[in-house]
Image (cartoon, grey):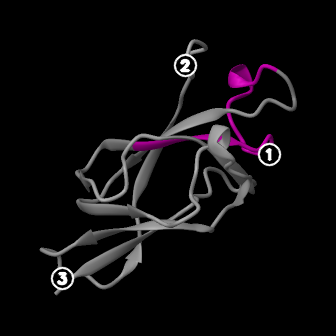
Amino acid sequence: MIARKIITLPSLSPTHTSARIVRLLVPSGTAVSEYQPVMTLRCSPDLIADPADRRTPGHQPTMLLECMEEGRLRWNDGVAPCEAGGKWLKVGDVLGEIVDEDDCDADEEWKWQAYLHEEDEGK
């Protein structure tokens, strides 16, 4: 049996509403494992974070997301980083899936971890 984990734009805090993809760290069709970073996001200013991490009230924090699933990752058509024309996405928007042919769990949303991340200015 094949299990599919649906990749959605996660809610990173109770008030978080949207984000833009800064970088896809894993190409579509790649096998991923637990704790593997898969993307960076620029989050809307409504993301609740430690006040010490905010530069201004309108600061848009960048977050690194790690996958907590194993399988083959497939991004949906049109999922693109902001420098490639990517747009603001709403929390819950479907970005792709992770397919695990060795797992017999029912289809469900993916599990993830997120961390504050500073993008290198030179990239």
The residue identified by callout 3 is 104
Q: SS at mark 2?
A: loop
Q: Is residue 57 magenta?
A: no
Residue lying farthest to the right in this orientation: 57
Q: Mark 1 belongs to which amino acid? A: Asp
Range shown magenta: 38-55
Instruction: Give me the C-alpha separation between circle 3 and circle 2.
Output: 40 Å
Q: Earlier in the sequence, mark 2 or mark 1?
A: 1
Whole-percent x, y for residue 32 in the image: 25, 52
Q: Is residue 54 magenta?
A: yes
Location of residue 4 in the rendering, given as x and y in whole percent from the top left corner? 32, 77
Q: Are marks 2 and 1 in contact (CB under 8 Å)?
A: no
Name the residue tied to disc 1. Answer: 46
Query: Which residue is found at the position 46% from the left and 66% from the top?
Result: 96
For the residue pair 28 and 9, the one nearer the viewer reads as: 28
Does 109 sit above or below residue 9? Answer: below
**Residue at (26%, 79%) from the top-left corner?**
3
Q: How many marks?
A: 3
Along the horizontal axis of the image, is 89 left or right of 123? right
Q: Nearer the viewer, mark 3 or mark 2?
A: 2
Q: Secondary structure at mark 3?
A: loop
On the question of residue 16 being in view, the answer is no
SS at circle 1: loop
Q: Is residue 81 left or right of residue 27?
A: right
Q: Amino acid at mark 3?
A: Cys
The amino acid pointed to by label 2 is: Lys
Q: Which mark is residue 102?
A: none
